[in-house]
Image (spheres, rainbow, N blue to C red):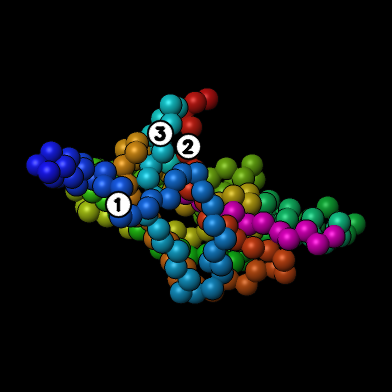
Amino acid sequence: MRVINLIFTLLIALGLSGCTKEYMKVPFSVEVDFSKKGTVYETDFKAPWNIWGSEVEFYIYLGINWISSDSKEGRIYDYIRTGVLREEGENGKKIPTEETPYFKLKVTLTPLGRASDNVIISSPDYSKIELSQKYVWRKRQHKDEGKIEFTIDIPLYGGDTSKELMIADLQRLRNYHIRVESLEDVELPDGVYIGFVINRHSRKV
């Protein structure tokens, strides 16, 4: 009995108790409608083991329910991906950044248990998207803050169909809590849905 108690105490101290909480395993994706103000998605997850590095990427994905081979669906997809609106028979025109609807998302990342509070976060600045669809990244180091919290504006059109929230340098196999809240309404084209994804990010070139 004393041995069992000792093992149980050690498990609790190491944050390895398997009798209670489940943590989402990375990679995973869920469908979340962030086009509606007040929508919140949150979950606990375990940072993955990745031989190529300890970075984890968080992004939303805009997909289309392809009901038919209608060229209209293809034009919507390209519009979301490139920010260029093409009507049938036209070359298309680039929509100015200030005219593009934006998702405004509040992101909160909280280390759990023995996970370190020292986290390096990189997030994109979508206001500076170039014609090549590349955008400027901002890197910030958070120390002893308990949780990392920021808001990000993400364009509906342009910047590809996968739109990054952040890349976080996390401790492998440690536990974290992620919370994403939509702060504004965004009108989506018909047939468009939104997925939220957490995945390994490789530093390998």
First along the sequence among labels 2 and 1:
1
* N-term-proximal mark, 3 vs 2: 3
What are the residue bounds of the magenta stretch? 58-68
Mark number displayed over residue 19: 1
Of marks 2 and 1, the one in the foreground: 1
Could you tell me which residue is drawn at 47 percent across and 38 percent down?
Answer: 200
Q: CA distance from mark 2 to mark 1?
A: 30 Å
Amino acid at pointer 1:
Cys
Q: Is residue 157 left or right of residue 105?
A: right
Asked if residue 97 lies left or right of residue 37, the reply is right
Q: Nearer the viewer, mark 3 or mark 1?
A: 1
Q: Decide: few, some or many residues near mark 2? Use Cα within 10 Å; few <14, some 14-19, many ≥20.
A: some
Q: Nearer the viewer, residue 72 or 66?
A: 66
Q: Quadrant of residue 133?
A: top right
User: What's the residue type where badge 2 is placed?
Assistant: His
| Residues at circles 3 and 2 in contact by the CB criterion of under 8 Å | no
Tell me the residue at 38%/42% (across/down).
47
Task: Answer few, some or many: residues within 10 Å of disc 3's Cα (few below 14, many 20 plus, some between 14 and 19).
Answer: some
* Kind of residue sitting beneath label 3: Trp
Residue 198 coordinates in the image, percent (x, y): 48, 48
Res 124 visible = no
Q: Which residue is tagged 2? A: 201
Earlier-in-chain disc, 3 versus 1: 1
184 drawn magenta: no
Q: Quadrant of residue 87?
A: bottom right
Cα separation between marks 3 and 2? 11 Å
Query: What is the secondary structure assignment of the residue under circle 2?
Result: loop
**Residue 10 vertical position relative to residue 202 in the rendered view, above or below:** below
Please give the count of numbered marks on the rendered protein: 3
Q: Position of residue 7 (x, y in %)?
A: 17, 40
Residue at 23%, 48% in the rendered image: 113
Residue with the mark numbered 3: 49
